[in-house]
Amino acid sequence: MVKLMAPGGTQAMAFAVLEAGADAVYVGPAGWSRRPPEDELRDEEIREINEFARNRGQEVKVALNSVPGPQEIGLLYHKVEQYINWGLSSFILNDIGCIRQLCRRFPGVDIHASVTCAVCNREDVRFYQEIGANVVILSYRWGVEIDQIRTIKAEVPVGIEVFLFSLLQEGIICPGRCTMSPYLRFDRWVDSEGKDHCFGSANRGGSCHRVCQAGWDVDHIDGSPAKRLGLKSSPSLILRELPDYVEAGVDYLKIPGREHPDGVMRDITRFYRKVLDEVLASLNPAVVEHFVPEWEELKYRWKVERVQRDRFRIWRAGQSDS
């Protein structure tokens, strides 16, 4: 049965989306999950969220999808062991070595290969399944590739997770493989546990500065005038694809938005819970057109919040420390 997964950028958000009907919530420990500190959680907060979710029969996924340095591997294993002792057993990772080693060190853990693994084809999916991933998150750069999802489900014994958004402009930036941000600004500090925080590099545990969405002058080979554009557009929440995703056998439908306000994510989660329940209950091909007015309103709220946040990050990156 397909599950709805929603973000927990704050503890209040995690509680809100679980109460709104999410089957699972994903959270990120400070310094380990590709977000700035304000969108990550302390370990004790994660423990409390897990106790809340477990009492309700819901799941918590812990995002550890930064790339650890050599000195941080031991810290990562210690953190995973701590979470397992608290009853958590599901983790989102993107480092190949860590996926393999966590499966060997902690048999029975549930591993989601992060969207930042940047899978591009069925063989990539197969590779991550073979090294231990139970679920592979498809890159939103794929678009809505329903036939590809059907083929993966038929050929590879792995769960599939998709985002509930698409890019209006496909772009050339691949999540998890971009190194543009730290060239603009890079702040670094080490916390009391020894974790190296690298704000400006999502790959190293901070958030990026959204450099790709700033204006860029792109020259044309044929000599025509340069065109000013962003290298990647802001995404848009989807609706009409849900019945096809369910029919194709998708295992997790993921709502993005750890950086958004708690109330926005609560309302979006409640909306998708309602839509998904109707799709699952339909005996015929599900029709979701009557949800369009509410969907359009939520899309607008989500986009406004995201654009404002992205503009702030771009502005902040351009400021000097003085």
Image (cartoon, rainbow, N blue to C red):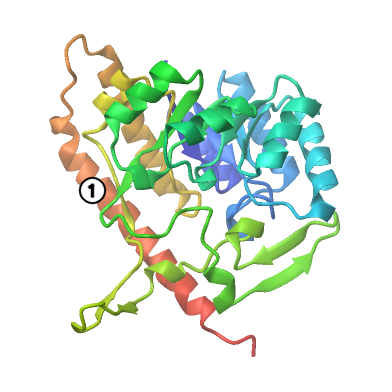
Direction from residue 160 to residue 52 in the image, left or right: right
Question: Could you tell me which quadrant the C terminus lies in?
Answer: bottom right
Question: Could you tell me which quadrant the N terminus lies in?
Answer: top left
Direction from residue 167 to residue 69 in the image, left or right: right
Q: Residue furthest front?
A: 222
Q: Residue furthest top?
A: 283
Pick the front one: 213 or 155:
155
The secondary structure type at the circle numbered 1 is helix
- The residue that appears at 86% across and 59% down in the rendered structure is 192
Pick the front one: 125 or 80:
125
Q: Residue furthest bottom?
A: 322
Q: In this view of the protein, can residue 17 be seen by the observer?
A: no
Q: Height in image: 137 above or below 181?
A: above
Q: Position of residue 215 (x, y in %)?
A: 34, 77
Q: Height in image: 145 above or below 322?
A: above
Residue pointed to by mark 1? 297
- The residue that appears at 25% across and 54% down in the rendered structure is 168
- The residue that appears at 39% across and 48% down in the rendered structure is 264
Q: Height in image: 278 above or below 199?
A: above
Q: Position of residue 302 (x, y in %)?
A: 34, 52
Pick the front one: 63 or 169:
169
- Could you classify mark 1 by the number of other residues whose Cα lies within 10 Å: few (under 14), some (14-19), or many (20 or more)? few
Q: Amino acid at mark 1?
A: Glu
Q: Position of residue 259 (x, y in %)?
A: 49, 54
